[in-house]
Image (spheres, helix red, strand yellow):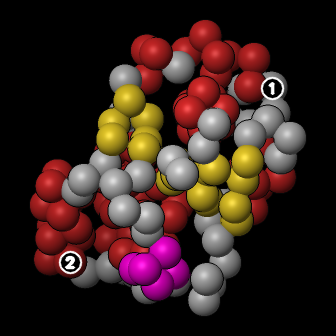
């Protein structure tokens, strides 16, 4: 089964809020995933929740991660109407999950609520 993950899953795994086993093997992501994770890592460092050295290692891990990255341009037409229910960024994840008949894994409760009925969604909570 194909699994789409959003940046919240990756970031929560990095910070230990989710076990690293929560990350599926070779998930599918829209290409904006990398920029969202990079932004999230920067925010964690600025907020004092992650050491800069750890963030640098995580950036290198992200560069080598076995993710199937789908160009965002392929998702735009489908994502546009979905952006009424979720953010435009999140609509790309929902559009990808719907297109691939995949389950969207997220640690973002708001996204999970907004995506309900648009694609299969699994909200990952601490300890899952």
Marks 1 and 2, the one that precedes in the sequence: 2
Q: Which residue is mark 2?
A: 54
Q: Is residue 10 magenta?
A: no
For image coordinates 20% across by 77% down, the residue present is 54
For image coordinates 40% across by 80% down, the residue present is 20
Q: Residues within 10 Å of mark 1 (few under 14, many from 20)?
A: few
Count of numbered marks: 2
Q: Main secondary structure of the magenta part?
A: helix
Q: Quadrant of the C terminus?
A: bottom right
Kindly tell me whether residue 66 is visible in this rendering. yes
For image coordinates 62% across by 65% down, the residue present is 107
Secondary structure state at the residue bearing disc 2? helix
Q: Is residue 49 above or below residue 63?
A: below
Secondary structure state at the residue bearing disc 1? loop
Q: CA distance from mark 1 to mark 2?
A: 36 Å
Q: Which residue is mark 1?
A: 84
Do residues under tags 1 and 2 come within 8 Å of each other at their CB atoms? no
Residue 9: x percent and y percent? 51, 64
Chain part drawn in magenta: 18-22
Examine the image and state in which quarter residue 43 appears: bottom left
């Amino acid at each position: 089964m194909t699994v789409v993950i959003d940046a919240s899953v990756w970031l929560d795994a990095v910070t230990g809020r989710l076990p690293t086993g929560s990350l599926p093997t070779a998930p599918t992501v829209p290409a904006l995933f990398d920029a969202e994770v990079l932004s999230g890592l920067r925010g964690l460092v600025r907020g004092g929740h992650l050491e800069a050295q750890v963030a640098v290692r995580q950036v290198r891990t992200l560069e080598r991660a076995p993710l199937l990255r789908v160009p965002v341009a392929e998702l735009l037409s489908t994502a546009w109407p979905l952006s009424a229910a979720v953010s435009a960024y999140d609509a790309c994840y929902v559009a990808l999950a719907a297109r691939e008949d995949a389950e969207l894994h997220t640690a973002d409760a708001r996204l999970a609520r907004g995506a309900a009925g648009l694609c299969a969604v699994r909200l990952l909570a601490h300890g899952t």
